[in-house]
Amino acid sequence: MQKQQKQSVTIRRLRLFRRALWIALPVVVLSALGAYLWTDGARLLISTKSANPLISGKFSLVDHNGRTVTDADYNGKWRLMFFGFTHCPDVCSTTLNTMAVVMGKLGSKANKIVPLFVSVDPARDKPAVLKEYVLAFHPRMIGLSGSDAQVEAAAKAFRVYYGKASGAGNTENYLVDHSAIVFLMDTEGRFSKVFSHNTDIEKIVSEIRQRL
Ligand code: NI
């Protein structure tokens, strides 16, 4: 009798444990997935091939003619987009040059694309400075910037990181660290594809051709 009671208690405990496990398991799995998405956001961003829920692509900025624009102003066109700053010693100019070469290689198809350069250094990159800079790369390239808050919001919408380099001081010669990723956004401003700034040009051209 006592032995039977002991057994049933054990079985009850076992059942309780199993039930707890069924409740806990999804929580553990979801937490792990959440942690993965947050910590490996960058990797996810690079590997994703289609619509990316992490990148809204929304922005409200000021273009190089001093006009306030949003992502919707470019609807109907694909956008090849890069964030940087005009004083950048090499990565930005190399990348904008790559974008211009890609446009050239796409021939008439390039008419479907507007190349955009967003400055994350609005203090120095005023519209006139931006205009002169981007037009040196491509006649249809548009320079965008705006208030600190506008630039910050745009960078967030693309999950772009930027910040003054440490030890920059208050001189006019500071550097700005920034993500070096080229975004291909579709005709409604939705995420389509990203390229690392040093992706092979032919690879970028063929990836874009497949989508246009
Ligand atoms: Ni740069």
Image (spheres, rainbow, N blue to C red):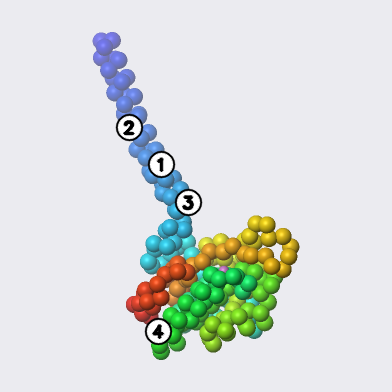
User: What residue sits right under mark 3 in the picture?
Assistant: 39
Does residue 173 appear in the picture of this structure? yes
Could you say which quadrant of the image residue 205 lies in?
Answer: bottom left
Ligand 1 lies under 8 Å from the Cβ of mark 2? no
Give the structural element (helix, strand or loop) at label 2: helix
Residue at the spot of label 1: 28
- Hey, what amino acid is under mark 2? Arg
Under mark 4, the amino acid is Leu
Q: Which of marks 4 and 3 is in front?
A: 4
Marks counted in the figure total: 4
Q: In which quarter of the image is ligand 1?
A: bottom right
Q: How many residues crowd around disc 1 within 10 Å: few (fewer than 14), some, or many (20 or more)?
A: few
The disc, 1 or 2, on the residue closer to the chain's N-terminal end is 2
- Image point 34% across, 24% down: which residue? 13
Q: Which mark is residue 2?
A: none
Residue 18, disc: 2
